[in-house]
Each structure stands twice: as structure tokens, then as C-alpha cells.
Amino acid sequence: MKTPYKNFDLPKQHLIGEHYVPARARHADEIERRRSLPRGTLLLEQQQSGLTIASHILDDLEDESDLRFATETLAASGLNAGWYSYAQQAPVMRRQLDLPELADDTYEWRESRDGLLLRVRDGLAHAAELASTLVQATPEHRSFKRHVFNFGRQMGNVSLKLACVRMGNAPLSLNAFDVQSAARDESLAALDTARTIASTIGVNPSIAQLSDPDSPLAVYWRRAAPNGAYKALEEAMEIRRAV
């Protein structure tokens, strides 16, 4: 019997499109605050905020088209965020991620869609905690690179779960190898979307962009999303602003 796939490679050679740059501040107090921050901190702040928004988006999606748009877009954006921290500057040609385990023939077990979404929310929360650690750290700190590495790997792993949400509730008639093979195909498709959708959005999508309602990703979401996913983003941003 073939061993089911367990790993997924995130290649060093991935993004070639335009990279996202946070919009410049307009108010004097924010301009001064940003000037006081260590290099790269603003983007880390936006990643932390974007992860919180991403988690809220998934709270109330029921329609299949809404869930599909949200998970596909978030998976692509999350894979890019993971790549920037985990693979872009890697000394090797690829970094290994964990393909989500969706099936086990020994126990006749199949992961449910609800169970996978729960794992996604937990993963996003953990990634937000790691982003918070990075915001509070400084590039000069001896453990900073390790924190960046851990954050990037976590983002990559939770993004693969997002990419595979529709694979939840796989039937027992499919053996574990076939289920994991399909999960690998979904992950490859998500990676391809992450790389190519910049031609539609204008820049490479990344989770940080969800923190800014005027970012290229947020604008794309409002233009392209089904009604339920559109409303979910608006409500998630409103919740974040109220905190």
C-alpha cells in the first residue's frame, strides 16, 4: 500500500510580481510613530491585524461559493506571507511544509470540514501570536530570525489547511492515499494562484493587506467576492476597528 503524502514543498523561486508596500501615513502622529519603529515592524503589525480579520471572516460563512472564495483567497495570501518569512531567503531551494492530514485508513477516519475549519482558526490564532511576538521583538535580538522562521512556517501550514477545506468529509470509499493526493493537488493549485493572481489584483496578495480597506487585496475582495464573503470582510474589518 502506498504511503499517503504528508509533506509539501514551498519553493524558494516563487513570486516575481510586484510586492505589496503599505500606504504612506497621512496624519502627523502616525507618521511620527512609524518613524520610531524598527524597519519592517509596520508590515508585521499589519500581518497581525490581517490574521485577526481572516479568522473573523471564516466565522459565519455558510454558502459554498462564499466559503470557496474566502478560503482560496486567504490560502493564496497566506502562502505568500509564509514564503516571504520562510522561503524567500532560504539557503536551500525549497522549504518543507506539513500537508494537512485528512484521512487514516487504519482507523477509518476522515477529517470533517468543520474539524478542518476549527484547525484553521486555531492555526490563524497561533500565527497572530507569533506575529505579535515579532512586533515586540527587534531585528537585533538574537532570536529574531528564529521567530521569523517559525512565523513563516506556521503561515504556510495554516494556508495549506485553508486550501484543503473543501476536501473535508472525504468518503471512506477513497483510500487515504487518494485523499492526501487530492489535498496535495489542492495545495499546488493554491500555490499557483498565489503566484499568478497578482495580474488581477495588481500586487502579490498577502495577509497583511487585509488590515487596510484600501489595499489592493481588500479592493479585489470587495469587487470579486460573492455577497456573503463580501459582507464577511466588511464585518471582520469593523470588528477589528472596534478593538
Image (cartoon, rainbow, N blue to C red):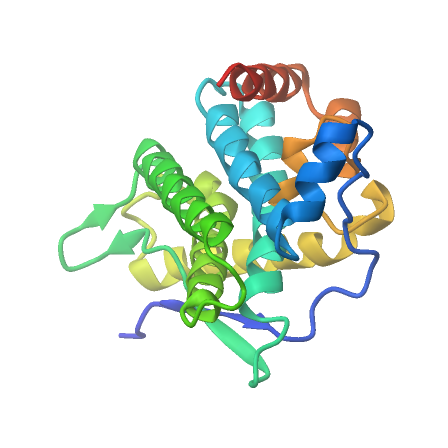
Find the residue positioned furthest to the left. 107
Q: Is residue 221 above or below residue 136?
A: above
- Please name the residue shown 50% across and 20% down the image: 61
Q: In the rendered view, does 104 fall on the left or right side of 50?
A: left
Front-most of residues 84 and 104: 84
Query: Do we see residue 218 in this rendering?
Result: no
101 to 142, vertically: above or below: above
Residue 33 percent across, percent down from the top left: 66, 38
Tag count in the figure? 0
Q: Is residue 20 left or right of residue 156?
A: right
> Quadrant of residue 97 in the image?
bottom left
For residue 117, say whether it is visible: yes
| Direction from residue 141 to residue 19 in the image, left or right | right
Q: List x then y, in percent, for residue 174.
A: 34, 52
Residue name at image x 67 percent, y 15 percent: 227
Please state which of residues 52 and 138 is positioned toward the viewer in this rendering: 138
Residue 240, image x, y percentages: 53, 22
Q: Report x, y in % for residue 195.
A: 72, 58
Q: Quadrant of the N terminus?
A: bottom left
Seen in the picture, residue 117 relative to 182 is either above or below; the reply is above
Q: Residue at x 64, y 55 (%)?
A: 40
Q: Nearer the viewer, residue 200 or 87?
A: 87
Outermost residue, bottom side: 92
What is the quadrant of residue 115 in the picture?
top left
